[in-house]
Image (cartoon, grey):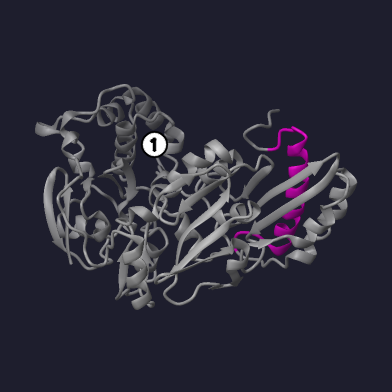
Amino acid sequence: MDVTFLLNGETVQVDAAPTRTLLDWLRIDRALCGTKEGCNEGDCGACTVVVTDENGAKALNACILFLPQLHGKAVRTVEGISGPNGALHPVQAAMIAHHGSQCGFCTPGFIASMTAAHLQGRTDHDDILAGNLCRCTGYAPIIRAARAAQDADPPEWLDDDDAAMAVSAQPYAPETIDALAKWYAAHPDATLIAGATDVGLWVTKQLRNLPQVAFLHRCTDLRGIDIGTDTIHIGAAATMTEVYAVMQLYHPSYAQMIRRYGSEQVRNAATIGGNIANGSPIGDNPPALIALGATLHLRHGDVTRDIALDAFFVTYGKQDRASGELVTGVTIPKHAPNLRCYKISKRFDQDISAVCGCFDIMVGNGRVTGARIAFGGMAGTPLRATAVETALIGRPWTDTTINAAVAEFAADYTPLSDMRASDHYRLTVAQNLLRRYFADSAGQATTVLEVRA
């Protein structure tokens, strides 16, 4: 299928297989080998490129980015970040001056991430570079280079990346929810691809063939976030970067969990609808959304329906979603000041949760008046702790009540043991997270970012 985009300032037209990755095409077809293949699953950042569209520049992993997702956009690889006659971008000059490279394998990815951030005017370098791994140089000189370049003006040669190109949408990339819903109802066995942070691994790791696909990146009406008087509606194709920005304003504890959700590159691509629809028992969004009492919106053809999100997950690998029915969005309360989200993983940044627990407990006149508690990693689906909630509601908000309620976790969950944690560890952590919430509600420091010797 014909795909047209800008590559390092020049228009290219590619007859692409739907699931051909940008990384493979760059290295094999274009001999642009500066973009490296490391993990080939979006974890190491060696393949990072700069992608510009109508929303500006962002860093993305080329290894799990399919060529049709680039239609009408602009791509800069490390070869296109420098300017005419070899003029260096400020971040490239700073990396040299501050000795930010040794073996150099990871350096192109760092340069691309730093360039995207530089175009955005961002200075939160630790967050920006959390998705780029370096095994030999160490991060100190790289961070020093990013700081040294942050106040320099973006070079003029990047101004060419105005991605408002006069290109038409392809049949497998509909521009409206109406068109997508009609097509998907007629092709229920097709794969819907939004950010490809999960589907990309089906191709790169499982070598799966996906004969029918639809790309959702042109469905702008599937992406919006609408903030109402009492609720927030999030379109299914909203990226986790976009969700993070809104949650910082309204649900800061949820936002802090999102900040650890993948990397900058992954959050720029991953969508909230994709995270929900794949039904993973260790997805980090569902526990937070279930604790908030979220409503899920689905559509099949012209028929729409709404269900409570906690009813969507039936059992492992099965959701309450008919063939050809798609997730269109989710609605949550605008205010939930008692919400707390706790992600437990081996690494603080960019790691899959062993346990993710979210709590929204209401207390009035010293007694628990309401409670919603949900966990990921504790069962075959994200699941509420209904027995624990029952043990709390109506009782005094005290240590005695907490100690009685923690025993009920064994009634709610029978966790499995796997490479990330044992069943005993998971159950113990869940119990201790309720105690952590109690301490948190009393204003005690409870995170590794707050506790000081």
Q: Residue at x 32, y 59 (%)?
A: 176
Nearer to us in this view, 56 or 353:
56
Q: Which is more toward the observer, 391 or 46? A: 391
- Residue kind at label 1, given as amino acid type: Thr
Q: Quadrant of the C terminus?
A: top right
From the viewer's perspective, is 110 left or right of 290? Answer: left
**Foreground: 379 or 131?**
379
Residue located 26% across and 49% down the image: 35
Image point 88% across, 45% down: which residue?
Answer: 396
Q: Is residue 67 visible?
A: yes
The image position of residue 136, as x and y in percent, is 40, 40
Q: Is residue 279 above or below residue 51?
A: below
The residue sitting at 66% across, 57% down in the picture is 375
In percent of width and height, residue 127 lies at 46, 37
Instruction: Determine which quarter of the picture holds residue 108.
Output: top left
In this view of the protein, can residue 429 be seen by the observer? no
Q: How many marks?
A: 1
- Residue located beneath label 1 in the image: 137
Residue 426 magenta-highlighted: yes
Task: Assess disc 1: are there few (<14), some (14-19) or many (≥20) residues with their C-alpha within 10 Å of its C-alpha.
Answer: some
In the displayed structure, 59 sits above or below 30; it is: above
Q: Quadrant of residue 134?
A: top left
Question: Which residue is most to the right?
Answer: 400
Position of 294 compared to 115: left or right?
Answer: right
Q: Position of residue 124 (x, y in %)?
A: 44, 31
* SS under mark 1: loop
For the record, the magenta segment spans: 419-446
Q: Main secondary structure of the magenta part?
A: helix
Residue 57: image location, x then y, percent: 29, 40
100 shown above or below 179: above
